[in-house]
Amino acid sequence: MGRMTPVNMSVADVHAAAGMASDVKMPAAPEAGDLDNWAQEAYSLSVSAAASLGFPVGSIAAGAQRDALMFGSSRWKDVVANEHTYRFGVALRALVVVSEIKGSGALTLPVVAAKVELEGARASAQLLVRGYKGDDLGGLLPSWQSFGVDSYAQYMAAVSDLQKAIMGDSGNIQPELLATTVVDSKVPNPSEAIGSVYGLHAIAEGATLTHALDKLAIDDHEVSEAVRALYRSRIGEDERAVPDAQQRQDALDRLQGFHLSRSWFKG
Protein backbone atom coordinates (compact mmCIF):
# COMPACT_ATOMS: atom_id res chain seq x y z
CA MET A 1 0.00 0.00 0.00
CA GLY A 2 1.24 3.49 -0.82
CA ARG A 3 1.96 6.23 1.67
CA MET A 4 -0.99 8.33 2.83
CA THR A 5 -0.43 11.87 1.53
CA PRO A 6 -2.44 14.95 2.61
CA VAL A 7 -4.34 16.78 -0.13
CA ASN A 8 -6.42 19.91 -0.48
CA MET A 9 -8.28 18.76 -3.60
CA SER A 10 -11.35 16.82 -4.62
CA VAL A 11 -11.19 13.16 -5.63
CA ALA A 12 -11.64 14.17 -9.28
CA ASP A 13 -8.71 16.60 -9.10
CA VAL A 14 -6.53 14.00 -7.38
CA HIS A 15 -7.31 11.46 -10.11
CA ALA A 16 -6.47 14.04 -12.78
CA ALA A 17 -3.19 14.97 -11.05
CA ALA A 18 -2.25 11.30 -10.84
CA GLY A 19 -3.03 10.74 -14.53
CA MET A 20 -5.86 8.29 -13.85
CA ALA A 21 -8.50 7.69 -16.51
CA SER A 22 -11.54 9.95 -16.29
CA ASP A 23 -13.90 6.96 -16.14
CA VAL A 24 -12.39 5.55 -12.93
CA LYS A 25 -15.21 5.18 -10.42
CA MET A 26 -15.23 7.76 -7.64
CA PRO A 27 -15.35 6.40 -4.08
CA ALA A 28 -18.38 7.48 -2.05
CA ALA A 29 -17.68 9.71 0.94
CA PRO A 30 -18.93 8.42 4.31
CA GLU A 31 -21.54 10.24 6.38
CA ALA A 32 -20.46 12.52 9.23
CA GLY A 33 -21.64 9.99 11.79
CA ASP A 34 -19.34 7.35 10.30
CA LEU A 35 -16.16 9.33 11.03
CA ASP A 36 -14.88 7.11 13.81
CA ASN A 37 -11.19 8.06 13.84
CA TRP A 38 -9.66 11.13 15.48
CA ALA A 39 -6.07 12.26 15.05
CA GLN A 40 -3.53 15.00 15.51
CA GLU A 41 -1.63 15.34 12.24
CA ALA A 42 1.72 16.86 11.31
CA TYR A 43 3.46 16.95 7.93
CA SER A 44 6.58 18.55 6.49
CA LEU A 45 6.58 19.10 2.71
CA SER A 46 8.54 21.04 0.17
CA VAL A 47 6.59 24.03 -1.10
CA SER A 48 6.49 22.56 -4.60
CA ALA A 49 5.03 19.31 -3.28
CA ALA A 50 2.48 21.22 -1.19
CA ALA A 51 1.45 23.23 -4.25
CA SER A 52 1.03 20.06 -6.33
CA LEU A 53 -1.27 18.70 -3.60
CA GLY A 54 -3.56 21.74 -3.77
CA PHE A 55 -2.37 23.73 -0.77
CA PRO A 56 -2.29 27.55 -1.18
CA VAL A 57 1.42 28.32 -0.74
CA GLY A 58 1.75 31.30 -3.09
CA SER A 59 4.06 31.60 -6.08
CA ILE A 60 6.81 29.09 -6.86
CA ALA A 61 10.05 30.99 -7.43
CA ALA A 62 12.79 29.15 -9.30
CA GLY A 63 15.72 28.52 -6.99
CA ALA A 64 13.75 29.27 -3.83
CA GLN A 65 14.40 26.98 -0.89
CA ARG A 66 11.17 26.86 1.08
CA ASP A 67 9.36 24.33 3.21
CA ALA A 68 5.75 23.94 4.23
CA LEU A 69 4.87 22.72 7.71
CA MET A 70 1.34 21.61 8.43
CA PHE A 71 -0.25 20.55 11.68
CA GLY A 72 -3.77 20.20 12.96
CA SER A 73 -6.50 17.82 13.94
CA SER A 74 -8.89 15.66 11.97
CA ARG A 75 -11.84 13.34 12.29
CA TRP A 76 -11.91 10.78 9.50
CA LYS A 77 -12.70 7.40 7.98
CA ASP A 78 -10.75 5.54 5.29
CA VAL A 79 -12.45 4.16 2.17
CA VAL A 80 -10.65 1.63 -0.03
CA ALA A 81 -11.38 1.77 -3.78
CA ASN A 82 -9.45 1.48 -7.05
CA GLU A 83 -6.65 -0.29 -5.12
CA HIS A 84 -6.10 2.92 -3.19
CA THR A 85 -7.12 4.37 0.15
CA TYR A 86 -9.09 7.60 0.39
CA ARG A 87 -9.33 9.37 3.76
CA PHE A 88 -12.53 11.40 4.06
CA GLY A 89 -13.43 13.64 6.94
CA VAL A 90 -13.17 17.08 8.51
CA ALA A 91 -9.84 18.72 9.28
CA LEU A 92 -8.47 21.87 10.82
CA ARG A 93 -4.97 22.56 9.52
CA ALA A 94 -2.40 25.27 10.13
CA LEU A 95 -0.14 25.76 7.10
CA VAL A 96 3.18 27.55 7.65
CA VAL A 97 5.49 28.38 4.73
CA VAL A 98 9.11 28.86 5.81
CA SER A 99 12.12 30.36 4.02
CA GLU A 100 15.63 31.57 4.89
CA ILE A 101 16.00 29.08 7.74
CA LYS A 102 19.57 28.75 9.01
CA GLY A 103 21.09 25.54 10.33
CA SER A 104 19.84 21.98 10.06
CA GLY A 105 17.63 19.62 12.00
CA ALA A 106 13.93 18.93 12.11
CA LEU A 107 11.66 21.96 12.00
CA THR A 108 8.74 22.30 14.36
CA LEU A 109 6.40 25.25 14.77
CA PRO A 110 8.03 26.50 18.01
CA VAL A 111 11.47 26.27 16.38
CA VAL A 112 10.26 28.18 13.32
CA ALA A 113 8.68 30.89 15.50
CA ALA A 114 11.93 31.30 17.42
CA LYS A 115 14.06 31.43 14.27
CA VAL A 116 11.78 34.14 12.82
CA GLU A 117 12.31 36.26 15.93
CA LEU A 118 16.02 35.60 16.51
CA GLU A 119 17.65 34.64 13.20
CA GLY A 120 15.81 36.58 10.52
CA ALA A 121 13.98 33.60 9.07
CA ARG A 122 10.77 34.32 7.19
CA ALA A 123 7.47 32.51 7.60
CA SER A 124 3.81 33.09 6.91
CA ALA A 125 0.83 31.12 8.11
CA GLN A 126 -2.85 30.51 7.62
CA LEU A 127 -5.51 28.22 9.01
CA LEU A 128 -7.46 25.93 6.69
CA VAL A 129 -10.75 24.15 7.42
CA ARG A 130 -11.86 21.29 5.19
CA GLY A 131 -15.09 19.32 5.39
CA TYR A 132 -17.16 21.76 7.46
CA LYS A 133 -20.09 23.79 6.10
CA GLY A 134 -21.04 25.81 9.19
CA ASP A 135 -21.16 29.59 8.78
CA ASP A 136 -20.06 30.65 12.27
CA LEU A 137 -16.27 30.36 11.95
CA GLY A 138 -15.50 33.72 10.36
CA GLY A 139 -14.55 35.39 13.60
CA LEU A 140 -12.31 32.52 14.65
CA LEU A 141 -10.14 32.25 11.52
CA PRO A 142 -7.01 34.47 11.53
CA SER A 143 -5.91 35.70 8.13
CA TRP A 144 -2.62 34.84 6.38
CA GLN A 145 0.08 36.69 8.34
CA SER A 146 3.74 36.78 9.30
CA PHE A 147 4.58 33.94 11.67
CA GLY A 148 6.56 34.54 14.86
CA VAL A 149 6.45 33.92 18.61
CA ASP A 150 3.35 36.09 19.16
CA SER A 151 1.44 34.71 16.18
CA TYR A 152 2.39 31.16 17.23
CA ALA A 153 0.58 31.71 20.52
CA GLN A 154 -2.38 33.24 18.67
CA TYR A 155 -2.54 30.30 16.29
CA MET A 156 -2.51 27.75 19.08
CA ALA A 157 -5.38 29.59 20.78
CA ALA A 158 -7.28 29.80 17.47
CA VAL A 159 -6.76 26.09 16.82
CA SER A 160 -8.19 25.24 20.23
CA ASP A 161 -11.27 27.43 19.68
CA LEU A 162 -11.87 26.13 16.15
CA GLN A 163 -11.40 22.53 17.19
CA LYS A 164 -14.11 22.89 19.82
CA ALA A 165 -16.45 24.55 17.31
CA ILE A 166 -15.95 22.05 14.49
CA MET A 167 -15.21 18.55 15.67
CA GLY A 168 -18.34 18.00 17.75
CA ASP A 169 -20.74 19.66 15.32
CA SER A 170 -21.71 16.61 13.26
CA GLY A 171 -24.69 18.40 11.74
CA ASN A 172 -22.38 20.75 9.83
CA ILE A 173 -19.64 18.26 8.97
CA GLN A 174 -19.63 17.38 5.27
CA PRO A 175 -16.73 14.94 4.79
CA GLU A 176 -14.22 15.83 2.08
CA LEU A 177 -11.04 14.15 0.88
CA LEU A 178 -8.23 14.83 3.36
CA ALA A 179 -5.53 12.38 2.25
CA THR A 180 -5.00 9.48 -0.12
CA THR A 181 -2.47 6.98 -1.37
CA VAL A 182 -3.27 7.88 -5.00
CA VAL A 183 -0.68 10.65 -5.22
CA ASP A 184 2.08 8.93 -3.22
CA SER A 185 4.21 8.18 -6.28
CA LYS A 186 3.09 11.29 -8.13
CA VAL A 187 4.43 13.99 -5.80
CA PRO A 188 7.40 15.56 -7.65
CA ASN A 189 10.66 16.42 -6.00
CA PRO A 190 11.46 20.17 -5.85
CA SER A 191 13.66 20.14 -8.98
CA GLU A 192 10.97 18.39 -11.04
CA ALA A 193 8.31 20.77 -9.81
CA ILE A 194 10.39 23.88 -10.55
CA GLY A 195 11.27 22.54 -14.00
CA SER A 196 7.64 21.79 -14.78
CA VAL A 197 6.42 25.23 -13.71
CA TYR A 198 9.29 26.94 -15.55
CA GLY A 199 8.60 24.89 -18.68
CA LEU A 200 4.89 25.73 -18.63
CA HIS A 201 5.71 29.42 -18.34
CA ALA A 202 8.18 29.14 -21.21
CA ILE A 203 5.57 27.47 -23.42
CA ALA A 204 2.94 30.04 -22.41
CA GLU A 205 5.40 32.79 -23.43
CA GLY A 206 5.97 31.10 -26.81
CA ALA A 207 9.60 30.15 -26.18
CA THR A 208 11.28 27.26 -27.95
CA LEU A 209 12.93 24.59 -25.81
CA THR A 210 16.36 25.84 -26.92
CA HIS A 211 15.53 29.38 -25.80
CA ALA A 212 13.95 28.21 -22.53
CA LEU A 213 17.03 26.18 -21.58
CA ASP A 214 19.35 29.01 -22.59
CA LYS A 215 17.52 31.41 -20.27
CA LEU A 216 17.21 28.95 -17.38
CA ALA A 217 18.93 30.58 -14.41
CA ILE A 218 19.57 27.35 -12.50
CA ASP A 219 22.46 24.96 -13.13
CA ASP A 220 20.52 21.87 -12.10
CA HIS A 221 20.38 18.77 -14.30
CA GLU A 222 17.07 17.56 -12.85
CA VAL A 223 15.41 20.93 -13.51
CA SER A 224 16.70 20.93 -17.11
CA GLU A 225 15.51 17.37 -17.69
CA ALA A 226 12.08 18.23 -16.30
CA VAL A 227 11.85 21.12 -18.77
CA ARG A 228 12.91 18.84 -21.65
CA ALA A 229 10.38 16.16 -20.67
CA LEU A 230 7.58 18.70 -20.49
CA TYR A 231 8.40 20.13 -23.93
CA ARG A 232 8.61 16.68 -25.50
CA SER A 233 5.20 15.73 -24.11
CA ARG A 234 3.53 19.00 -25.16
CA ILE A 235 5.48 20.36 -28.16
CA GLY A 236 7.39 17.41 -29.63
CA GLU A 237 10.99 16.41 -30.22
CA ASP A 238 12.04 19.51 -32.21
CA GLU A 239 13.90 21.72 -29.72
CA ARG A 240 13.43 24.76 -32.00
CA ALA A 241 9.69 24.34 -32.48
CA VAL A 242 7.68 27.40 -31.50
CA PRO A 243 4.57 26.62 -29.41
CA ASP A 244 1.38 27.40 -31.30
CA ALA A 245 -1.51 29.43 -29.89
CA GLN A 246 -3.37 26.39 -28.53
CA GLN A 247 -0.26 24.94 -26.89
CA ARG A 248 0.43 28.31 -25.25
CA GLN A 249 -3.11 28.56 -23.94
CA ASP A 250 -3.07 24.97 -22.67
CA ALA A 251 0.14 25.69 -20.73
CA LEU A 252 -1.37 28.86 -19.27
CA ASP A 253 -4.47 26.95 -18.18
CA ARG A 254 -2.34 24.20 -16.61
CA LEU A 255 -0.49 26.74 -14.45
CA GLN A 256 -3.76 27.54 -12.64
CA GLY A 257 -2.49 30.89 -11.39
CA PHE A 258 1.01 29.86 -10.27
CA HIS A 259 3.72 32.25 -11.39
CA LEU A 260 7.47 32.65 -11.21
CA SER A 261 9.00 35.64 -9.47
CA ARG A 262 10.65 36.81 -12.72
CA SER A 263 10.63 35.98 -16.40
CA TRP A 264 13.56 34.65 -18.45
CA PHE A 265 11.72 34.23 -21.73
CA LYS A 266 12.01 37.71 -23.28
CA GLY A 267 14.90 39.34 -24.98
Image (tube, helix red, strand yellow):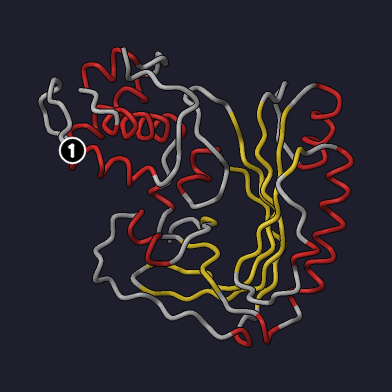
Q: Circle 1 sits in a helix, a strand or a loop, which is it? A: helix
- Count of numbered circles on the image: 1
Q: Write down the quadrant of residue 88 in the picture.
A: bottom right
Question: Would you say 164 lies left or right of 177 here?
Answer: right
What x and y, as percent, mark residue 16? 33, 58
Query: In the rendered image, which quarter contains the C terminus?
Result: top left
Q: Is residue 173 above or below residue 242?
A: below
Please, what is the three-letter code of the amino acid marked with disc 1? Answer: Ala
Q: Is residue 50 above or below residue 100?
A: below
Q: Write down the quadrant of residue 214 in the picture.
A: top left
**Along the viewing direction, whichever of 252 and 97 lies nearer the viewer:** 252
**Along the viewing direction, whichever of 91 and 126 lies nearer the viewer:** 126
What x and y, as percent, mark residue 154? 86, 50
What x and y, as percent, mark residue 15? 35, 61
Query: In the rendered image, which quarter contains the N terminus?
Result: bottom left
Name the residue rendered at 69%, 63% in the picture. 92
Question: Would you say 48 lies left or right of 195 here?
Answer: right
Label 1: few (<14), some or many (≥20) within 10 Å?
few
Name the residue rendered at 44%, 36% in the picture. 189
Name the residue rendered at 25%, 66% in the picture. 22
> Which residue is disc 1 drawn over?
245
Name the residue rendered at 18%, 42% in the picture. 246
Question: Would you say 127 lies left or right of 221 here?
Answer: right
Q: Is residue 233 above or below residue 179?
A: above
Q: Write down the quadrant of residue 107 in the picture.
A: top right
Question: Would you say 240 lies left or right of 111 here?
Answer: left
